[in-house]
Image (spheres, rainbow, N blue to C red):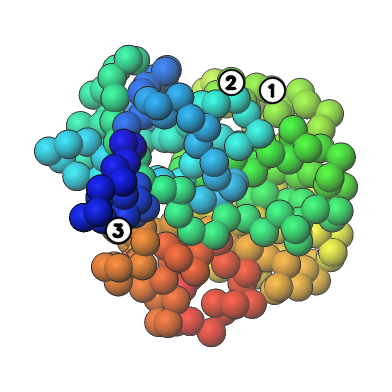
Amino acid sequence: MPTTTCACGGKAAAKDVKDNIFLPKEAKIVRVEKTTEMERIFTLRLADESQMKFEPGQILEVGLMGYGEIPLGLASSPTREKTFDIVVRSVGRVSQALNRLQQGDTLLVRGPWGKGFPLENLRGHDLLIIAGGIGLCPTRSLIQYALDRRKEFKRFILFYGARDPQQQLFLADLADWRKSQDVEYHETVDRGDPTWKGNVGVITSLFSKTKIDPGTRVVICGPPIMFKFVIRELEKLGVARANIYLDLERRMKCGVGKCGHCQINDKYVCTDGPVFAFSEIEHLEEAI
Ligand code: FES
């Protein structure tokens, strides 16, 4: 951003522009992959070649001129290259327009925003990540992080549930995790098909597949209906509410605490979250 030192305050004005939270940056699409009928994975690089600095669990506003923007969880770890991933599900005008973009096209990003996963409380403990449906997208940033920094965690367990085999995301990752020694990966689908040889049932059916220590730190992201049932299982196992983290990526618009769209009682999901300890929000009626 050019600056000027003229007496009229141009330098300050240029700084204001640079710090403007509503000003997006251009990002180039390095790779695009159709992962299901509805979702595409975009690998992006900032057009100015700078590094996107973020923490696992943070959010980006992703937009297209003339269409608007949508909040999306970063779906890759900051430990990986100069690129970053997002997943766009075609559910509205903006997301459908984004999903028409091709490799080499550009889009706009603002952020990263919000508080991500509390790495300081996860490190040094068993880590269980429970992802349902597109909840795998934001948690993938933490999964990659934990795999890249594997020694920082004790046991690493991953539960993933999808509606059916066709809805599974990140197929190459799933294939890696199935054979990885670094993560104890368990998966299920609500409805199988003739090709599916794995577990069929809701995500809580995976608790019978392994033993979870009460001191385990747990991260959950998925449809709201899943939270209640998963938390019930965790409480039976003696996991403390303060060690259960929920990713409440929803209802967000501006992403920066200005529009009130994401408000749950006195909390703003975009600035106080999107990741909350269950003990922090259990008293909020609308939270889960
Ligand atoms: S999304 Fe606007 S205040 Fe949170």
The numbered mark at residue 196 is none
Q: Nearer the viewer, mark 3 or mark 1?
A: 3
Q: Where is residue 263 in the image (x, y as percent from the top left)?
A: 36, 73
Residue at position x 64%, y 44% in the image: 142
Extreme residue toward the front, this view = 7
Question: Which residue occupies the foreground of this view, 281 or 46?
Answer: 46
Place residue 219 in its image quadrant: bottom right
The numbered mark at residue 176 is 1
Report the residue marked by disc 3.
Answer: 254
Extreme residue toward the left, this view = 66
Judged left or right of residue 89, residue 191 is right
- Quadrant occupied by the N terminus: top left
Residue at position x 50%, y 64% in the image: 273
Asked if the residue at tag 1 contacts the one at tag 2, i.e. Cβ–Cβ closer than 8 Å, the answer is yes
Gap in Å between the C-alphas at discs 3 and 2?
33 Å
Question: Which residue occupies the foreground of this view, 16 or 95?
Answer: 16
Place residue 213 in its image quadrant: bottom right
Residue type at tag 3: Cys
Packing grade of label 3 (10 A; few <14, some 14-19, many >=20) is: some
Judged left or right of residue 252, residue 231 is right
Packing grade of label 1 (10 A; few <14, some 14-19, many >=20) is: few
Residue type at tag 2: Ala
* Vertical order, 271 against 7 (above or below): below
